[in-house]
Amino acid sequence: MTSPTKPADKALKRLPEIRILGLDPGFANFGWSIVTGPSISKLRVVELGCFETVKSDKKMNVLDADDDFRRVKLLSRFVHHLHDEWAFAMVCAETLSPPRSSTVAKKMGMVWGMLADFCQVSAMPMVQATPKQIKTELCPGKGKPTDKMLHAAVRKRYPNAGQLMKESLPTKETKHEHPYDSLGAVEVCKSSDLMLTLFRRR
């Protein structure tokens, strides 16, 4: 399991800006990003990462159901930790893709149930973006863009994303797609009524 997050800069947290949590929700790899700014046109990413949950060693003789429950509790604790650290005002999440198996469907159902509970108890609004919407927003007219094309498009919109990625996941390039997808979700949600209303009320 990776470290939840580096301590947020206290001066940054005091700025009168709206903060948004971007998510690429996964059971084993939970991509996230914190985006902040005084307006939609001036949003910037200040932190990102990929929170991992790992299956228990078989030697521990733990039931899969119990182990899955333990892992989703870790995810819940992490999301609440992010909220305590950053006090974000809304969540932008990539939607659930069609599960490849019943096992994956069960695990992802647990993840989304956890997020629904978090939003309920925290009175937190959420807007979702489909993978297709993210690809169309980041790489319009590109047909079926590759991951490299999508990541480059994210870095173009958030110039410091690449550096933050190196600091957060220096030896785990295979995990980079998850934070990038979380930022892609934020990009799509910029045009949502919810985000527009949120910034108009400032």
Image (cartoon, rainbow, N blue to C red):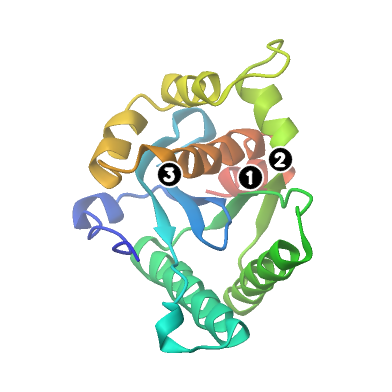
Q: Residues within 10 Å of mark 2 (few under 14, many from 20)?
A: some
In the image, residue 133 lies at what x, y percent? 73, 32
Q: Which of marks 3 and 1 is in front?
A: 3
Q: In the visual, does 92 lie left or right of 174?
A: right
Regarding mark 2 in the picture, which secondary structure is present there? loop
Q: Looking at numbered disc 1 in the image, what kind of residue is underneath it? A: Met
Query: Residue 129: which quarter of the image?
Result: top right
Q: Residue 192 carries which label?
A: 2
Task: Please report contact status of discs 1 and 2: CB closer than 8 Å, yes or no.
Answer: yes
Q: Earlier in the sequence, mark 3 or mark 2?
A: 3
Residue shown at the point (57%, 56%) measured from the top left: 90
Q: Which residue lies furthest to the front in this view?
A: 59
Q: Which amino acid does label 3 sit on?
A: Lys
Question: Residues under labels 1 and 2: Cα distance?
Answer: 5 Å
In this rendering, the answer to whether 190 lies above or below 76 is above
SS at mark 3?
A: helix
The tag earlier along the polypeptide, 3 or 1, is: 3
Q: Distance between the residues labelled 3 and 1?
A: 28 Å
Q: Name the residue under label 3.
A: 175
Identify residue type, mark 2: Ser
**Residue 44, relative to residue 83: is it above or below?**
above
Viewer can see residue 47: yes
- Tell me where residue 192 sits by quadrant: top right
Which residue is denoted by mark 1 in the rendering? 195
Choose between 36 and 114: the one closer to the eye.
Answer: 114
> Which quarter of the figure has residue 82?
bottom left
Instruction: Label 1, secondary structure: give it.
Output: helix
